[in-house]
Image: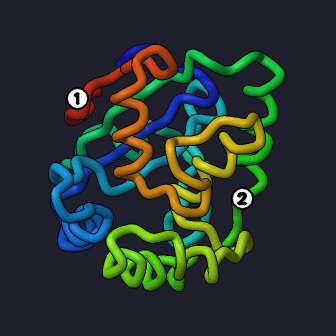
Amino acid sequence: MPSLRACDIVLTRSETFVGRAIRFFTRRLGEPPSRVNHVGIMVTPTLIVEALRTVARRPLAAAYGPPTKQSIAIYRPLNLQPEQEVQVVLKANSYVGRSYGYLKIVAQSLDWVLQGAYVFRRLAGMDRYPVCSWVVAHAYAVAGKHFGVAPGAASPDDIHDYVTKHPEKYAQVWPLSRWQG
């Protein structure tokens, strides 16, 4: 595993029923299949913040190292100044301990029916109950950065698509594969 930095974006793919469902419901008609179903953000070289049942800060190695079967991809921002990195990390850390936004998953499914329109997620935009992509997109938003959509509309697939299509802004640190430790 390469050395990591604060603000690195960690995208994951699991083959569970939930992982496959998330990838299905974050894909628009005519769009290639979604490759990832979860996203988190590094807040130190070893700790990731991600929305699980609650928003947690935990060691990346414990979360995604062996024996996990999940694949991860890591992208590093090339467009953040040091003071912006501090802002992003502070915002990501501010979500730690908050309950997961299960209602937002329902809202995202309803928006899927509208082919990705940002309607129901906007109505359910409760900052107190984030989902994984909300944490990353809103953390980056404090530095004036986005992933091609409004922060509340971002899905793991939107973030993955954006970072892979903008190599001048995001460098791939680790390709989507299992971390062998």
6 relative position to 147: left or right: right
Q: Where's residue 163, x and y in %? A: 42, 31
Give the residue at x 50% y 43%: 148
Give the residue drawn at x 77%, y 17%.
Answer: 82
Looking at the image, is 20 positioned above or below residue 146?
below
Q: Quadrant of residue 113?
A: bottom left
Disc 2 marks a residue whose amino acid type is Tyr
Q: Quadrant of the N terminus?
A: top left
Residue at mark 2: 95
97 sits to left or right of 77: right
* Alpha carbon separation for disc pair 2 and 1: 29 Å
Q: Secondary structure at mark 2?
A: loop
Residue placed at 60% from the left, 62% from the top?
152
Quarter of the rendering occupied by the C terminus: top left
- Judge from the rendering whether residue 14 lies leftward or rightward of residue 11; answer left or right: left
Residue at image coords 36%, 78%: 114
Q: Please, which colouring scheme is shown?
A: rainbow
Circle number at residue 133: none
Of marks 2 and 1, the one in the foreground: 2
> Label 1 belongs to which residue?
180
